[in-house]
Image (tube, rainbow, N blue to C red):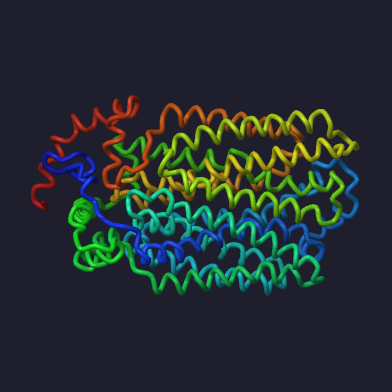
Amino acid sequence: MEMAGGSIGPAGVAKERAEHYQGKVTVYVIIACSVAAIGGSIFGYDIGISGGVTSMDPFLEKFFHTVYIKKKHAHESNYCKYNNQGLAAFTSSLYLAGLVASLVASPVTRKYGRRASIICGGISFLVGATLNSAAANMAMLLLGRIMLGVGIGFGNQAVPLYLSEMAPTHLRGGLNMLFQLATTLGIFTANMINYGTQKLQPWGWRLSLGLAAFPALLMTVGGLLLPETPNSLIEQGLKEKGRKVLEKIRGTKNVDAEFEDMVDASELANSIKYPFRNILEIRNRPQLIMAIFLPTFQILTGINSILFYAPVLFQSMGFGGNASLYSSALTGAVLASSTLISIATVDRLGRRALLISGGIQMIACQVIVAIILGLKFGKDQELSKGFSILVVLVVCLFVLAFGWSWGPLGWTVPSEIFPLEIRSAGQSITVSVNLLFTFIIAQSFLSLLCAFKFGIFLFFAGWITIMTIFVYVFLPETKGVPIEEMIFLWRKHWFWKRIVREVAGGVESNERQGIHGTR
């Protein structure tokens, strides 16, 4: 049964105690967050590596013979040469497995702690990487991908949560973005490695896929050595231990205010048996909507398509054989550096400012690219040098805008808006939705590209317009608001207060009796 205490707010955290929180960034927090963020680098590495491996001839020849033949005779339209459902399935089986795993990960993260999930994720990655690099047939290859997916499901569910809970309130956005930074660095590393291994015929691709075992090992060992988050310890009933960890990571003995908030939140959390059922309640409606829409929008910016499409553009500019390297390196480097911009500004300018400005810049870039390609890049003609350079510039601007707005914030915002009792369920929803749409786009992108041609950029620009308006209208600013006090935001927001208020008023009185025993 759901409860809302005596005269406390519906989230069970009574007073707005935030101003009494104390603590600085300790070495402890930094190490903990860095190790945890390695989880992100594996995610990135997998995204980056599969793109490169699927264009290596020995790999295609062994597993996807039809694509290999087709690629050798690629005189058909530039837009359609990789259009093969089997090849798409190799890439996207990972995301589907991740989706299922992140739902399984939720109860694990809740009952056994964030660390348990991080360790599970690390081990799955190890198994997956080993299977993939040793793959002798299609079955091994797919099984390996599925294990990697399981790792991603666990990792992406637990890591952002771990980061949010370890970070002191005033730096939560920045530390949380370590996850995104690690992801972008993972993508970048993968691109560099692919460049090296494509020269090692015919087993280079095995090396590419196998090297994922290295960060997986770091993540597993890190998970074993890291402290559990205080929130999770308290939720498991280990209050003293939780308090000690909190003192350690905040570097001060007076953590009373923050500790009290955590205890309140966890008492409420433990009174709730079914977080998924609870998340559907009307009072959690705003959070649920954000957990579904933000990750959906993140994928619908079309970033994957831009990153995929870059090599083709560079080739048509006459960079020749190394084109894909240059393009991946450039976009990878731009993505990683723009994430740094975000880390520096997110806790100062706030989440909304970044999302809206990034959105506007991305719309402009998509439209410009669509116009250039539509006019200049037809059946057989190549882009002239000048236009090519312009396209590259615009693509970089697009990636830059994504890297400081939707890239990191698509993960950060959902992980910080949930009250503790549904936080791990909420994070699972975010991850599953993200993976679901990544899967849909990965599976259908090549066909869409083949059908829409340059119009695909306008398709994404339309979505970015929708999401920018959505943020402007519906997302309250969350910078500097302690996690345990997010609930107050929704009650003050012009739109959400109508939905949340009705509940706060009406239902609470009936539920009050329930909690007197436990408080």
- Spot occupied by residue 151 in the image (x, y as percentages of width and height): 51, 63
Decide: is 484 above or below 463: below
- Spot occupied by residue 461 in the image (x, y as percentages of width and height): 63, 31
- Spot occupied by residue 114 in the image (x, y as percentages of width and height): 37, 62
Closer to us: 182 or 504: 182
User: Residue 506: which quarter of the image?
Assistant: top left
Closer to us: 407 or 501: 407
Left or right: residue 54 compared with residue 498: right
Closer to us: 195 or 48: 195
Left or right: residue 483 compared with residue 161: left
Which residue lies at the image location 48% right of the left edge and 65% below the top edge?
121
Which residue lies at the image location 61% right of the left edge and 73% below the top edge?
130
Which residue lies at the image location 77% right of the left edge and 35% below the top edge?
453
- Spot occupied by residue 402 in the image (x, y as percentages of width and height): 58, 42
User: Residue 208: which quarter of the image?
Assistant: bottom right
How many tags in the picture? 0
Left or right: residue 401 compared with residue 432: right
Left or right: residue 212 compared with residue 374: left
Decide: is 149 above or below 206: above
